[in-house]
Every structure is written in structure tokens, then in C-alpha cells.
């Protein structure tokens, strides 16, 4: 089974990225042939600072490796080191109905937030389809927000197969219900673009401050909170704490007499402990950047060995060769 996923270097990675995509991806590297990449071409639709992109790309590599991605068990690379993605993207673009892209939520959300759209942002799902199809991927672990993009991929692949003959494997998304949407500090989906994230790695003091600033309601300390399971801090605590600890906090909140401050403090402590080992590993990797570059270089070579023949297959099928 071939597994593939990507993540954009568009800002510091956060708990939503970790629980929604990175941890499932890391677990899946044991179960098949996994390809994971840093989607730097995709980041060009929203990040317009070259130095920022370079820094973010290296940060994503460090974060992912520190969190347990093992370059011996998977192929880890940078998207733009495999330029075959962009050629396949063109082949697919010609078969993608405008309406399909116009209906994409992620595009519509960005428009609604006042982002002035470039053509790359509109065509983003087609490049993503190329990323997936060029490795004959079977399974794509992602958070729920990416589901529609996988559906576009499936549609476009089926259309190509129908028109030019069987060429592409039709992929399946893998979305874990319990972490499909990790909430941010304001209760909306945690996202780099909403400024509501809790980073995986960062300085202790500002992170603590951020967690203590989680938005809660105005009910008094003594009041019972029968809806404790909807509380953002409780939801996040369930991700980072031992189930018995999370349950105890939730029940205390339900019963009343348990303050939001204490809850947030418990969240911070458990979160800080959860990533302790990874934090140390990241510091070690940061002292050995040459190794990180070498991992990405070797990953790109392995990825290209798989991507080239698939692209050739598509070129022949469509009459380019
Ligand atoms: P962001 O919205 O912060 O820019 P990305 O779009 O780069 O995040 O997402 C990278 C991966 O992390 C995707 O698979 C996405 O589904 C997942 N992901 C991002 N935010 C969340 C979240 N809040 N809950 C669950 N998964 C998420
Ligand atoms: N669009 C994804 C995101 O923003 C990143 C991505 C690009 C991706 N290409 C991919 C994810 C291919 C899975 C498969 O999160």
C-alpha cells in the first residue's frame, strides 16, 4: 500500500497539524510505503517572501523529523525538488472543470476572508491531485478540511482514465474522526491562517500565555458546567493528557467548583510534557542542519524514481509521446 501526504510550509506547525495529519502519518509509516513531502509549491499561493519560505521549509522538516518521521521508513522530501508534479498538474488542469474548483470550500473561505485570489490559489487542488496521483497513492491521511480536495483528485483521475485509458490509481482519504477538526484558541478550526494556533514547538512563556488566553464563557467558578465536553480546553486536554486526567478535569468542570484557570493550567502542563522528548530531538536536529538537508535530498531522489515513470505513463496515455 502506498501512503502519501503533504504539509505546506506556510507558518509554524500547530496542534491541529500534529493530531490531524502528522501523527496519523507517522503511525502509517509502519504500515506501508509512505511518501511525505513539504508542499513548498503550494505555499507560493499565499507566502510571498522568499526568505520566509526557506525558513518555514526547514522548520517543517525539523518539526516532522522531531515528531518521529523516520527517513529510513518513509520517503521525506520537498515538493519542488520533484518538478514532475508541476508537469502532471498541467495535464490534469486541462481536464478539470472550472465549476469543480469554484465549489472548493478552502478557496471560497479564502475569498470570503478578503484574500485577493491568484490563479495558483484557484488551481491549488489540481496541483494537489498531481501530488497524489504521481505516486500511485492508495491512502492520503489528512484532516477533514482536505477531504474535498481528495474528492477533486478522485474526479480528475477518473476523468483522465476514462478519456485516455486506465492510468491512475484512485486514492482514498484517511480522516480520523476524533481529530478531524482540532479547535483553536478561539474555538474555530485551528489554522495558521486564522492566527488561533497553539504551536507544537516554541518558547515556553509565550505558549503558556497563549494557552491561558483561551476564550472561555463568563459562568462563575461554582456553577456546574453540564456541557464540559464542548469546552475547548477540555477538547485539547483530551489530545495531550492521559485519558484519566482529562476525564477527571471534565468531570470536575461538570460538577462545578473547578475554575477555568486551573483547567488551562492543567492543559498547559500536559501539553508541555507531551512534547518534551520531541522538543529535545528538535534541538539536536537544529544543531545538525546538514543532516536534515541530506535527508531531503535523498528523499527527493527516491521520490523522483517513482514519479518519473508515472508521468511518462500519463504522457504516453495522453499522446504527448
Ligand atoms: P493550516 O490550516 O494551519 O494552514 P494546513 O492547511 O497546512 O494547515 O494543513 C496541514 C494538514 O494538517 C492537513 O492535513 C490538514 O487537514 C491538517 N490540519 C490543519 N489544521 C487542522 C485542524 N485544526 N484539525 C485537524 N487537522 C488539521
Ligand atoms: N493542501 C494540503 C494542506 O493544505 C497540503 C497538500 C498539498 C497535500 N498536496 C497534498 C496533502 C497532497 C495531501 C496530499 O494541508
Image: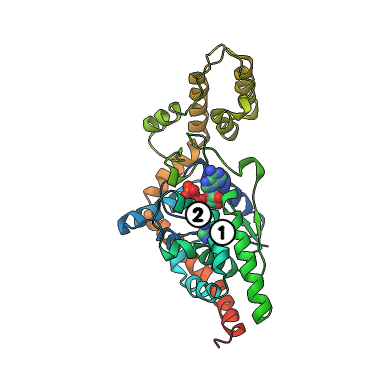
Task: Say if residue 6 shows up in the picture.
Answer: no
From the viewer's perspective, tell me whether residue 89 is left or right of residue 201.
right
Q: Position of residue 253 (x, y in %)?
A: 60, 19
Q: Quadrant of the N terminus?
A: bottom right
Q: Position of residue 169 (x, y in %)?
A: 66, 69
Asked if the residues shown at circle 1 and circle 2 are in contact, with their CB atoms under 8 angstroms apart, the answer is yes
Element at badge 2?
A: helix
Q: Position of residue 19 (x, y in %)?
A: 57, 43
Nearest the viewer among 259 and 68 is 259
Element at badge 1?
A: loop
Q: At x 65% / y 73%, what residue is drawn?
A: 159
Q: Residue 223's mark? A: none
From the viewer's perspective, tell me whether residue 226 is left or right of residue 120.
right
Q: Quadrant of residue 136?
A: bottom right
Which sits earlier in the primary sequence, circle 1 or circle 2? Answer: 1
Nearest the viewer among 78 and 123 is 123
Amino acid at each position: 500500500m502506498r501512503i502519501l501526504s503533504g504539509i505546506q510550509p506556510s507558518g509554524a506547525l500547530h496542534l491541529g497539524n500534529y493530531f490531524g495529519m502528522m501523527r496519523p502519518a507517522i503511525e502509517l509509516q509502519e504500515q506501508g510505503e509512505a511518501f511525505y513531502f513539504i508542499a513548498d509549491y503550494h505555499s507560493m499561493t499565499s507566502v510571498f517572501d522568499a526568505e520566509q519560505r526557506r525558513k518555514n521549509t526547514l522548520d517543517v522538516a525539523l518539526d516532522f523529523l522531531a515528531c518521529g518521521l523516520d527517513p529510513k521508513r518513509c520517503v521525506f522530501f520537498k515538493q519542488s525538488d520533484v518538478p514532475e508534479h508541476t508537469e502532471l498538474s498541467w495535464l490534469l488542469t486541462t481536464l478539470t472543470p472550472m465549476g469543480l474548483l469554484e465549489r472548493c470550500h478552502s478557496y471560497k473561505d479564502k475569498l470570503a476572508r478578503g484574500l485577493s485570489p491568484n490563479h495558483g490559489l484557484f488551481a491549488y487542488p489540481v496541483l494537489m491531485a498531481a501530488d497524489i496521483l504521481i505516486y500511485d497513492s492508495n491512502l492520503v491521511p489528512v484532516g477533514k478540511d482536505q477531504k474535498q480536495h481528495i474528492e477533486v483528485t478522485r474526479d480528475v483521475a477518473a476523468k483522465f482514465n476514462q478519456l485516455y485509458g486506465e492510468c491512475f490509481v484512485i486514492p482514498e482519504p484517511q480522516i480520523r474522526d476524533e481529530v478531524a477538526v482540532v479547535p483553536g484558541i478561539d474555538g474555530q478550526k485551528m489554522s495558521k491562517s486564522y492566527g488561533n494556533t497553539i504551536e507544537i514547538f516554541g518558547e515556553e512563556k509565550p505558549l503558556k500565555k497563549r494557552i491561558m488566553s483561551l476564550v472561555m464563557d463568563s459562568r462563575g467558578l461554582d456553577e456546574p458546567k453540564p456541557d464540559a465536553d464542548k469546552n475547548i480546553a477540555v477538547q485539547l486536554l483530551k489530545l495531550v493528557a492521559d485519558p484519566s486526567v482529562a476525564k477527571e478535569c471534565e468531570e470536575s468542570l461538570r460538577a462545578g467548583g473547578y475554575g477555568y484557570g486551573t483547567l488551562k493550567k492543567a492543559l498547559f502542563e500536559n501539553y508541555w510534557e507531551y512534547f518534551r522528548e520531541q522538543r529535545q530531538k528538535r534541538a539536536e536536529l537544529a544543531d545538525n542542519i546538514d543532516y536534515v538537508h541530506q535527508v531531503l535530498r535523498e528523499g527527493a531522489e527516491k521520490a523522483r524514481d517513482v514519479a518519473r515513470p508515472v508521468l511518462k505513463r500519463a504522457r504516453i496515455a495522453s499522446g504527448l509521446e
